[in-house]
Amino acid sequence: MAVYTDVQPEAAEALLTRLGLGPLHSLTPIGAGIENTNYFVRTATDVWVLTLFERLSTAELPFYLQLMRHLADRGLPVPAPVAGPEGSLIHEVSGKPAALVNCLKGKDVVAPTLGQIRQAGALSARLHMAATDAPLRQPNLRGPQWREQAAQVVAPYLQGAQAVLLQEELAHQQLSLASADAQHAPQGAVHADMFRDNVLFDGESLSGVIDFYFAGVDHWVFDLAVTLNDWCVDLSTGHLVPDAAQALCEGYAQTRTQAGQPVTAAEWRLLPAMRRMAALRFWLSRLADWHLPRAASLLTPKDPAHLERVLQDCRAQPWRPAL
């Protein structure tokens, strides 16, 4: 979440009127995140989040918005997009495609407890199960092809050991995806960005997961690896914290088993490779944002060095849970 497009109160007021949500009380820009423009929109009775999409096309948006609506309708704590009079979830604000969703209660936790980490794993599994009959399918747009292309963009900024690391990981990615385990591991709609700052807690209880705009069809275990690489690493060193990783995987596995789709042996074998793939994906995006920043009134690019350390640790410590 960032601010690339300035939204005037009149534009937000017009959207609220069109959706029948009452008069605007306040419009506040949200400076966190990096991809889209976001504002808190407050009325007399409710708080909404207005998102203007800066990169995603109108043709790509139905997948994300219908996935969120589908999950919300199944009782998952995710933002529910508001439909217009004609039923569309996509609106136009300040010349950009936009969505309006309810603001979930709670806040993110920088240092989650093991119990909170276990809840995050369980929610990830619930999401995977609930999305199996989602109405639309769309590939993960930050998948293997994007990673190859992004590597070409950032390669001129890397030298020495970093350049070698990038080429080795691209080769490892190709081998891993061609393996028999990758061919047989289940896939479906995944969040693909369930970092701790995208999950909300109300006290000790998980109250929401937000920012679905990197979602797409991919291996479920890739999604688990993305989450593990953020929730279960030391933020100062990038090293895996085994107790945290075990708690996340336990929460995930138990929920999958309860849903009648236990985690397969192929998925657990793939987890170390998927951790490397997930670390590569976010290292690449942070390298691009760092070296090729976009103009925005509120934006602080995240240092790619942290994800490089996580990637190095994934290579040095090919961890699997004791389950």
Image (cartoon, grey):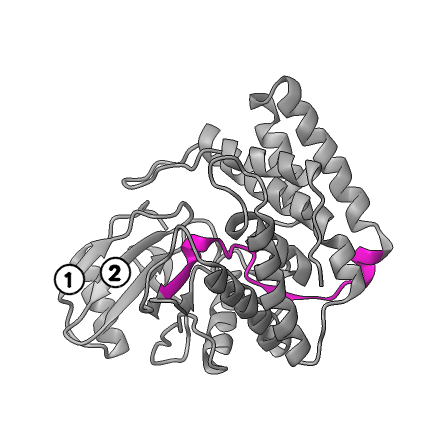
Residue identifier under label 1:
26
Place of residue 198 in the rendered image (x, y in percent of width and height, measured from the top left):
43, 57
At horizontal 35% and vertical 76% (from top left) the residue drawn is 84
Front position in the image: 269 or 181: 269
At mark 1, the secondary structure is strand
The stretch of residues the image draws in magenta is: 181-201
Q: Residue at x 69, y 36 (%)?
A: 316
- Dot 2 falls on a residue whose secondary structure is strand
Distance between the Cα atoms at labels 2 and 1? 8 Å
Looking at the image, which is closer to me, 266 or 300?
266
- Residue nearest the viewer, comparing 146 with 72: 72
Contact flag, marks 2 and 1 (Cβ < 8 Å): yes
The answer to which of marks 2 and 1 sits earlier in the sequence is: 1
Residue 153, horizontal then vertical, whole percent = 58, 31
Q: Quadrant of the C terminus?
A: bottom right
Q: In the depicted view, which residue is nearer to us: 113 or 273?
A: 113
Are there few (<14), some (14-19), or many (20+) residues within 10 Å of tag 2? Answer: some
Q: In this image, 261 relative to 41: left or right? A: right
The picture places residue 227, in percent across and down from the top left corner, at 55, 55
Type of amino acid under label 1: Ser
| Residue 155 seen in the current view | yes
Quarter holding residue 169: top right
- Residue 217 is marked as none
Query: Is residue 194 located in the magenta-colored stretch of the structure?
Result: yes
| Residue extending farthest right | 180
User: Which residue is farthest top?
Assistant: 160
Q: Which residue is mark 2?
A: 40
Q: Residue at x 77, y 67 (%)?
A: 264
Residue type, label 2:
Phe
